Image: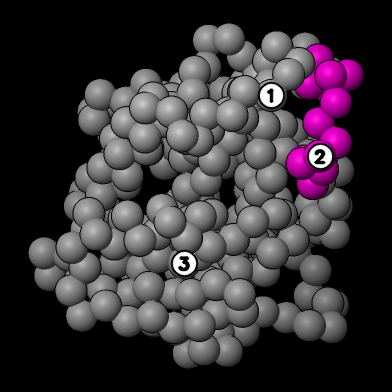
């Protein structure tokens, strides 16, 4: 049940007029790449907390992006304000580490569930240890992503606040729960979306891996760069089909 007794409620402070699906993006560099790929016309940039709202037209169609954002508490602040503007459908694009040898650097994951190991979800009336995206939209995101030739997995994600506390014991624990990736935002975003009754999915590019219990950084690899290019193309295709 929604808590109507919270003292501070999200409102559309910036009087934003946005288009759906709204793309939430974790990294500023990816925002700039996506703006270039979309060839956005009449581009507006509006400050929103530590992020910016980017509004423009691609082939005459309105597009809205928001970012950057990192971590569950901040990502949900941005989401709450975007929901207050009236948007009902969201896609989060971020990065994740692989927990499975079957999921390579440069691949994508569309989460079908996210384990809660962050504190923000516990501020909402939730009793489960796992949260879910909207199934139909997630299936569409995965389908469109695969159309670019990108390798796209659907599976469970471990979502943590502790980037520097991803111990071998924790990695093994979530591997045993069939988690194939780890990142910092999805479970909280899914929790808020469920609470506010809006549609949410996520598309994550694999930037590194931990499944061997040591860290392999793949940000500078050719596989990551090629995967990122295909993934951003998939987001463009998804917007064209919306």
Relative to 29, say whether 112 is above or below.
above
Q: Neighbour class for label 2 at 10 Å: few (<14), some, many (≥20)?
A: few
Residue 188 image offset from top left, x and y in percent: 70, 51
* Disc with the residue nearer the chain's start (2 vs 3): 3
Figure quadrant of residue 17 = bottom left
Q: Which residues are magenta?
A: 160-172
Q: Label for residue 164? A: 2
Name the side, left or right, on which 26 lies relative to 54: right
| Residue at position x 30%, y 39% in the image | 229
Relative to 179, say whether 80 is above or below.
below
Residue farthest along the left direction in this orientation: 59
| Residue at position x 52%, y 29% in the image | 218
Q: In the image, is residue 167 part of the stretch drawn in magenta?
A: yes
Q: Neighbour class for label 3 at 10 Å: few (<14), some, many (≥20)?
A: many
Name the side, left or right, on which 65 lies relative to 94: left
Residue farthest along the front direction in this orientation: 220
Residue behind mark 3: 66
Point out the frontmost of discs 2 and 3. 2
Q: CA distance from mark 2 to mark 1?
A: 11 Å
| Residue at position x 79%, y 46% in the image | 161
**Type of secondary structure dominating the magenta stretch:** helix
Could you tell me which secondary element the residue under label 2 belongs to? helix
């Amino acid at each position: 049940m929604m808590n109507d007794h919270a003292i501070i409620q999200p409102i559309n402070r910036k009087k934003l007029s946005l288009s759906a699906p709204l793309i939430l993006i974790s990294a500023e560099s990816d925002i700039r790449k996506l703006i270039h790929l979309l060839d956005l016309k009449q581009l507006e940039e509006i400050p929103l907390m530590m992020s910016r709202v980017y509004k423009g037209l691609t082939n005459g169609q309105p597009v809205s992006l928001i970012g950057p954002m990192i971590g569950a508490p901040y990502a949900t602040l941005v989401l709450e304000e975007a929901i207050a503007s009236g948007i009902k459908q969201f896609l989060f694009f971020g990065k994740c580490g692989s927990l499975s040898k079957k999921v390579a650097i440069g691949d994508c994951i569309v989460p079908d569930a996210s384990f809660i190991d962050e504190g923000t979800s516990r501020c909402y009336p939730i009793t489960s240890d796992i949260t879910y995206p909207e199934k139909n939209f997630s299936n569409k995101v995965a389908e469109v992503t695969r159309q670019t030739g990108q390798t796209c997995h659907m599976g469970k994600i471990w979502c943590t606040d502790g980037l520097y506390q991803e111990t071998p014991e924790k990695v093994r624990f979530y591997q045993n729960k069939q988690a194939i990736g780890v990142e910092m935002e999805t479970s909280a975003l899914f929790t808020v979306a469920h609470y506010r009754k809006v549609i949410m999915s996520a598309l994550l590019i694999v930037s590194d891996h931990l499944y061997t219990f040591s860290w392999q950084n793949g940000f500078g690899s050719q596989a990551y760069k090629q995967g990122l290019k295909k993934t951003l193309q998939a987001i463009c295709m998804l917007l064209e089909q919306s």
